Image: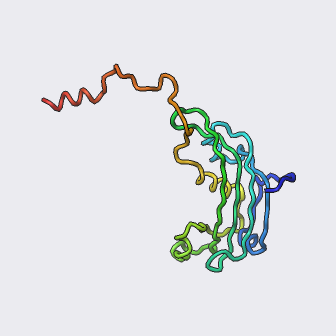
Amino acid sequence: MSSREEQDLAGTVIDSLKFAADGGCITGKLALTSLPRLADVLVRPTGSLQCELTGIPEMGAGEPGLHLRVSGRVGLQCQHCLAEVDFECAVDSRLLLMPPGAPEESWPADELESDEYDAMPASRELSVLELVEEEVLLALPIVPRHADCLLPAGAGIEESEPSPFAVLAGLKKH
């Protein structure tokens, strides 16, 4: 991504087919606070993501596509100790644009079976913010946690308390 002053992409909307056909390229950043669905899963929605979107006139099956790269650091909640864990977000997605209104059954199944790219419907008004947010959400770990995580103090199971299932075991004997 470029080191020069980059534009805020929050309000950027493109005609995806025209952008791809022209081989367009935009770079910029998105503040984490401008991504509401992503902000909901973050410990602190501070900072920004660096983004680059490039149009590809002919990607697969003769169809145009988009290449999206997103990088940045986000803070997720560790599901083990509940403290913040840094996650280095690195999205590198190639998206095959399918003609508007084409039913998913008509999309080229052979090409979509590979992990080389995903398909999405083309749009005359594609919000870059919504595209980035969707791809970043898909890239997040399902269960974020530290590599070497300990339970917080007091979170361990007390050995002295009887299990609630012990009562059920007693009933089973009768």
Above or below, 47 against 134 in this view is: above
Q: Position of residue 34 (x, y in %)?
A: 72, 47
- Residue furthest left as drawn: 174
Location of residue 136 in the rendering, given as x and y in whole percent from the top left corner? 64, 52
- Image quadrant occupied by the C terminus: top left
On screen, residue 11 versus residue 41, left or right, reads right
Answer left or right for 173 relative to 95: left
The residue located at (77%, 54%) in the rendering is: 9
Q: Nearer the viewer, residue 3 or 142?
A: 3
**Residue at x-position 79% and y-position 61%:** 26
- The residue sitting at 52% across, 44% down in the picture is 143
Residue 144 placement, left or right of 25: left
What is the residue that sits farthest to the front in this orientation? 148
Picture coordinates of residue 85, whole percent (x, y): 61, 38
Q: Is residue 106 above or below residue 69?
A: below
Quadrant (top left/top right/bottom left/bottom right) for the N terminus = bottom right
Is residue 141 shown above or below 122?
above
**In this rendering, position of residue 122 left or right of residue 105:** right
Is residue 150 or residue 141 the one in the foreground? 150
Q: Residue furthest bottom?
A: 62
The spot of residue 18 in percent (x, y) is: 75, 73
Q: Residue at x 59, y 49 (%)?
A: 140
Q: Quadrant of residue 112?
A: bottom right
Count of marks, rendered view: 0
Which coloring applies here?
rainbow
Work out which residue is located at the far right of the displayed protein and give it.
4
Identify whether 81 is placed above or below 96: above
